[in-house]
Image: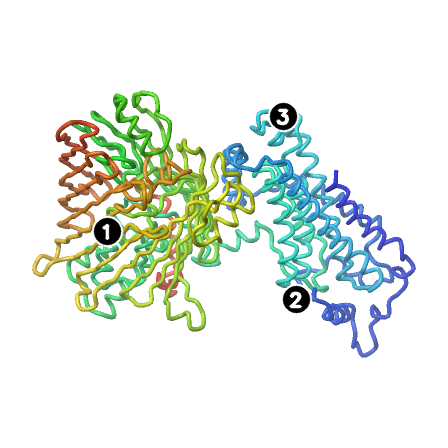
Amino acid sequence: MRVKAMVLMVGLGAMTAAFGPESIWAMPQQNDVKTDAGASSTAEQTTEGSAKTNWSPSPLPVRSNRYPDERDSSASRWNFKNYGMDILGDQKDIWTSPTKVRFSDANWLIPAAMASAGLFATDHEFSRHLPSDPRTIQRYRDIANGSVGALAGIGGGFALWSAFTHDEHQRETGFLSGEAAIDSLAVVEALSYATGRQRPYQGDGGGHFFHGGSSFPSDHSAAAWAIAGIVAHEYPGTLPKFIVYGLATAVSLSRIQSRDHFNSDVVIGSGIGWLISQHVFAKHHDPELGGTEWPSLRELTDESKSSGPHNLGSPYVPLDSWVYPAFERLAALGYIETDFLGMRPWTRINCAALVEEAGDKNRTMQPFSPEVSDLYEALRNEFQPDLDAVDGDGGLSVHLESLYAGATEIAGPPLNDGDHFGQTIINNFGRPYEQGFNSYDGFSGYAIAGRFTIYVRGEYQHSPFAPAYSGSVRELIATLDANPVQPANPFLAINQFRLLDTYAAAHVGGWNISFGKQSLWWGPGEGSDFLLSDNAAPFYMFRVSRVVPIELPWIFHLLGPMKIDAFFGELSGNEFPPRPLIHGEKISFKPTHNLELDFARTVEFGGVGRPLTLGSLFRSYFVVGYVDNATPANDPGIRTGGFDFTYRIPYLRDWVTVYFDMAYRPVKAGFNPGFYVSHFPGIPKLDFRAEAVNSDTYLTNPGEYLYFDGFYHDLYTNHGNLIGSWIGRQGQGEQAWSNYWFTARDRLQVNYRHEKVSAQFIPGGGTLTDVGIRADWWVRPRIGLSSQVQYEVWNFPVLHPGAQRDIATTLQMTIKPPDRWFEKNRHESSADQGVDQPSAKEKAGS
């Protein structure tokens, strides 16, 4: 009820201003009368008067004057009759808007629906992280009520103050703020009554609909964002925006923290308020008074058709795609200089720009060698449709990217616990496997509409039954992890459909904003990365990534092009504690064409037993250094830093690249150096790569440094697999690969891997050694076969006396269906042969 009273205050302020000093508002004003010389006008006097305040409006090009006659009359248009009719007209527009939906509105409606579905799916789990202390809850309720009151005071204050200043701009701001708030509350109250959703503290906390509740959507959030939107666009200065949007954000966050609403209630309520505010502003605002343009979402998405590649949607290329080795070979040969190996995946538009860069190098440096020409042609054929799409109409396009089926037969007992012992199969998106027949059958595809992208990859997975660990092994694991001994449950056969990378994304001004399941690889290596890799299944995250490199101003331009990647997500399958959260940030620089420097940080925090508050969230981002004796309330989480670099040796630049990856927590660090030889003299199709990886560091207790914490016993795991390096908690390892490239996509590879786990961690220690051979062959341009045979010997005395052997044989078939829709767009976009087409670097903003 408080929010309704506060909104009523805005309306009363407007009514008081309209009818209290009626003699002032009704009489002709001196500054409304034009002189014979035409030297003054209402707009000029308003601008001059408002320039004396901190809320001075910026000039706005006149789009339309919806009330041309009323501004010259002696009476203001703001009276009870007009105000009531405006609100009734707004309600008619709002409730009949579904009948006016156009097909092009799918550009924003579909991503909004996807984001809403994601919020509904995670509401219950997220709310369980929140504080339950009554004093904390009341504090957040006070913050929300106080912030709504402040916004209502700003809106009502404008209306009241204008009665004395006779400032039409202030008057309009006050009236439109009240109108937008009233419109928003009318809609929210109707939806709340119709949906009847329970609040987080009602029932079983599941937020069930049609149970007589009033949680969906949030009325506080709707009113706050409705008022904030009007004020921010009437007075578009930095300070006013910071104040009103800051207050609105405080309202939204506090309503979640106080457990009065779920995430979806607040986000959708805020969106309702903001959209209604835009409608009220666009319909009733007089542009001659000042303010700024406020286009609708329909106008914004329509503009994306001609706004260029900075706003063109584009999906990420999967991490297991053949294009990444091809790009690295081109870069090592000196034909690409703007690649960022430490931050993958890349979008298709980004890849297309790299292809064009290689073409530019060919024209300015030297003709392609046969090997480079093959790489360039294969990559150009892959990404040419994306470049052509930039010249298209930006309409809806749907693409079936791939169909694939894979099977792995494992003869002999494999290792399947990288956290403690080792893994027979690594970097495989956390696919389950056991001794016997394993399979996965999947698909991937995406849709693009203007700046928006939806990507889906899913597969059906099968792995056979396996017996439980022995009692002694379960006791050892319990001791290593400081957990209770787990029951002797066997590993049941798995037959499941699982989504891999599946997300909705929007590309805005060189930034890709995405939400859903995603995989990241934050390092330059091929086989291991300490912070993030595809060793585990993708996890849910909200991600913001800089697609187009930028350069900092002033002296910071010496750092060269820069990219930023940041995410906020939740890990699944953890038990000690369940449902931990994780966020990470990475920044990459290229000071020279040869050198890439990357700095990263991840924080695992929250989870059952660690309440999620604004304070804990703030500390997880900004607290640095070691925190001794932290309580659950002030613990900043487990913070892991990362640093890596890539350097192409100048005198050997055509064939030698060295790189280094490191993860560190206080005192000690794990490291992962490597080097890559792109070809050998006289054998241009042969390459070689070698890496070493070491996590054998601890302070006092073995195994309690990387990938373990006294509270987060399942640290850095998702569904039981490490999201970082396969080396695990206290091991040393080496890897080596050599490829003979018949074409850009066809190769024969031999590989080697060795792991040694410290005896200080596992009694008696342990070793794992495997060698393998792999062949990738595209028998047709759209049909590819991949086969691999791996022979492994492992010896962990605690698991089995003596050495154990296994052979894993894998066969996969991939089909890339013809993309008829893309072909159609390509022909249409190249119809005008008389106009010079921009380069891909211009298209992709490189």
In the image, farthest residue toward the left: 682
> Looking at the picture, how far across and down is residue 769, in whole percent?
15, 39
Q: Determine whether 105 is above or below 648 in the image.
A: above
The amino acid at mark 3 is Phe
Q: Residue at x 47, y 51 (%)?
A: 451
Q: Is residue 391 visible?
A: no
Q: Determine whether 560 is above or below 570 in the image.
A: below
Q: Secondary structure at mark 2?
A: loop
Q: Secondary structure at mark 1?
A: helix
**Pointer 3 residue:** 210
| Mark 3: few/some/many CA within 10 Å (<14, 14-19, 20+) | some
> Looking at the picture, how far across and down is residue 73, in whole percent?
85, 62
Q: Earlier in the sequence, mark 1 or mark 3?
A: 3
In the image, farthest residue toward the right: 23
Name the one closer to the observer, 436 or 423.
Answer: 423
Residue 58's disc is 2
Residue 325's disc is 1
The amino acid at mark 1 is Pro
Q: How many marks?
A: 3
Q: Secondary structure at mark 3?
A: loop
